[in-house]
Image: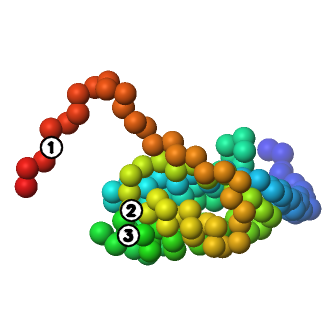
Amino acid sequence: MPEEKAVATAPVQAPAKVSKKKIRKTVPLAHAYVTATYNNTIITVTEPNGNVLAWASAGVCGFKGTRKSTPYAATVTAEKVVEKIAPYGVKSLKVFINGVGTGREQAVRGLHSSGLELEAIFDTTPIPHNGCRKKKSRRV
């Protein structure tokens, strides 16, 4: 029987971690999409090509239940979004409003009062041209 010889090997070192430095893009003009429903207000800020930079909703800002649908909640949501997009160097916005909630105008005012220039405001709320029959009204 041949004897086994112990061979000493050097410990294998893990490759050094190379950390990539994140490059922050500067976006001078961005698009803000305000979705104002009866129950909530959601604001999303994107680059002109559609990549999302930041978003916030009244629920994320700490409002619960019926307080999410208030105009004040929409203002707070707009201010929070402006804080999040500050590192991108956004100077002006095109605002697209969708929905019939109470936070429509206040969200736009919140974006404007935070120091951003509003290039244009578009209302993209879908309006039927007498297509489908409407749902029957609720009787309470």
Q: Are marks 2 and 1 in contact (CB under 8 Å)?
A: no
Q: Do the residues labelled 3 and 2 touch (CB within 8 Å)?
A: yes
Q: Where is residue 9 in the image (x, y as percent from the top left)?
A: 90, 59
Residue occupied by mark 2? 102
Q: Position of residue 10 (x, y in %)?
A: 92, 62
Helix, strand or loop for disc 2: loop
Q: Is residue 39 above or below residue 132?
A: below
Label 1 crowd (10 A; few <14 / some 14-19 / many >=20):
few
Helix, strand or loop for disc 3: loop
Image quadrant of residue 91?
bottom right
Helix, strand or loop for disc 1: loop
Q: What residue type is labelled 3?
A: Thr
Residue at 72% of width from left, 49% of height from top?
47
Residue occupied by mark 1? 137
Q: Position of 93 compared to 37: left or right?
A: right
Label 2, label 1: how far apart the Cα atoms are: 20 Å
Residue at 30% of width from left, 69% of height from top?
65
Disc 1 or 3, which lies upstream in sequence?
Answer: 3
Residue at 66% of width from left, 51% of height from top?
120
Residue occupied by mark 3? 70
Q: Where is residue 139 in the image (x, y as percent from the top left)?
A: 8, 50
Asked whether 91 or 52 is in front, the reply is: 91
The quadrant in which the N terminus is found is top right
Label 3 crowd (10 A; few <14 / some 14-19 / many >=20):
many
Disc 3 or 2, which lies upstream in sequence?
Answer: 3
Q: Which amino acid does label 1 sit on?
A: Ser
Asked whether 34 or 14 is in front, the reply is: 34
Label 1, label 3: how far apart the Cα atoms are: 23 Å
Query: Which residue appears farthest toward the top when viewing the image?
Result: 131
Label 3, label 2: how far apart the Cα atoms are: 6 Å
Q: Which amino acid does label 2 sit on?
A: Thr
Residue at 34% of width from left, 72% of height from top?
67
